[in-house]
Amino acid sequence: MSSVIYLDNAATTPVDPRVVEAMLECLGPAGDFANPAAVAHAPGRRAQQRVERARSEVAALIGADPAQVVWTSGATEADNLALLGAARFYKTRGRHLVTSRTEHPAVLAACRQLEREGFEVTYLRPGADGIVEPRQVEAALRTDTILVSLMHVNNEIGVVQDIGSVGRLCRARGILFHVDAAQSAGKLPIDVELDCIDLLALTAHKLHGPKGVGALCVRREPRLGLVPLLYGGGQERGLRPGTVATHQVVGMGAACRIAAEEGSEECSRIAGLRERLWQGLATQVGATLNGHPTQRAPGILSVTIDGVEGESLLYALPGLAVASGSACATTSAEPSYVLRALGRSDRLAQSSLRLSLGRYTKDDEIELAVQAIAGAVERLRAVVPPVAAG
C-alpha cells in the first residue's frame, strides 16, 4: 500500500490512529467491552458511558442534541430508516416525495421501494453544474408532499447543495427534510437546527472513522415519527434494535471530535491540493471539470478526459488508487447516472475519473499523480485517437 498514492477517499478513508486507539480501549478483557445495555453492573455502565460520550461527540459536530442521534450500521441504513420509516409513518398525510436524480443509490433504491408501495416520487434533474436549485424543489412541492430528500455533497462530483434554503422552505410548508451528509460531515459546516433538517444521515468511514457504523439524527421537537426497519430488543428508542457495538460507536465519536477540532484547517489544506490537482490535469491532459466550479466540497474532483475510456485509464494507473465514479457503482458497466443527469453523453460519462483527497494526502503526491495520469493518457490516446466530443 505504501507504493500506491491513495486518491479514493470518497469511497473510504483510512482510520485515524487516534480513532484506532479509542476503539482498542473497548476491546479485549481489560477494555470496556461489556454490553452497554447491561447497566446493572459496573462494566456495563462503563460501556454505556463510552457510548453516550460518543453520541455527544457526533451531535456536537452537527449542532444537534445527543438524544437525537440514533446509531446505525452506516449512512445506507440511516438513509433507509429515514425515508422508509418516515414515509410509512406519515402515509396517511400524503404519499408524495421529492428527491433528485443524482442522489446516492441508498436514497434512490429506497424511493423505488416506496414507489412499489404506492408512493409517488418526483426526481428533480440538476443543472449542468450538478446543482439542484431551491426553486426547483419549491415548484415540485404538492399538497400531499410529505418529505424532501437532498444530499449535501454529491459523492461522485462533489457539488454542494444549498440545504439551508431547502430546509427552511420545507419547514415553512410542514414538510420533512432529509439530508444525506455522508460526504460532508466533518468537511463542511452543518447545523441541523439552523438548516431546518429533520433527518440527517451520517457514516464514520468517510471522515477517518471505522466502517460499519453510522448514525441518523432525528428531529426531537416536535417529535418525529418513524416506523423501524428492524425489530428486537428495543435499543436506540426502538428505532434500531440490537446490541450497540461499543468499539464502533466510540470510533465514530472520536472521528467526529477530531473533525470538529481540526476540520477547518484540514479542509483548507485539502482544497488547496485539490485545486493544484485540477489545474495540473486541465493543463497536462485537457481535462474538463464535472460539477460546479466553486460550489463544491474540498476533497472531491471529478474530471472528464476526452478520448480515453475511464476504466482503461484506471488499469493504466497501477500506482494510483482512483475511481471512474462512485464506489457503489463500480460493478456496473453502465455510464455514470450522475454524469448522465448533468447532460453528459455516454462516451463522455465513461471518460471520467473521480479523485478524492483526505487527511493523509501529501503535497508531493499531487504532482506525482498528475504526471502518472498524463503519461497514461498519452499512451492510451496513441492507441485510440480521440474522436469528436459529444
Image (cartoon, rainbow, N blue to C red):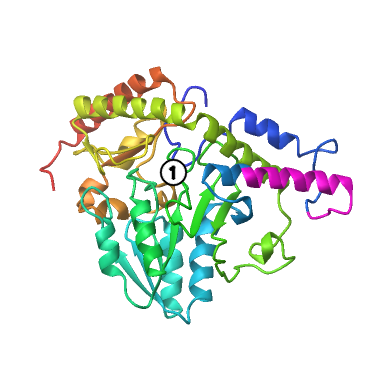
Spot occupied by residue 64 in the image (x, y as percentages of width and height): 55, 50
| Viewer-closest of 152 and 288 | 152
Q: Amino acid at mark 1?
A: Ser
Q: Residue at x 28, y 57 (%)?
A: 134
The picture places residue 146, in percent across and down from the top left corner, at 42, 72
Circle 1 — which element? loop
Residue 168 shows in this picture: yes
Picture coordinates of residue 69, whole percent (x, y) = 60, 53
* Extreme residue toward the top, this view: 364
Task: Tell me how many marks there are.
Answer: 1
**Label 1, on which residue?**
184
Judging depth in this view, the residue of 351 and 65 nearest the camera is 65
The span picked out in magenta is 37-56
Residue 5 in view (yes/no): no
Q: Point out residue 59 in the picture as x, y percentages from the top left corner.
A: 58, 47
Q: Which residue is rendered at x = 43% and y = 36% of the image? A: 8
Q: Is residue 270 left or right of residue 307?
A: right
Q: Main secondary structure of the magenta part?
A: helix
Magenta-drawn stretch contains 257: no
Looking at the picture, does residue 81 appear above or below residue 378? below
Q: Quadrant of residue 135?
A: bottom left
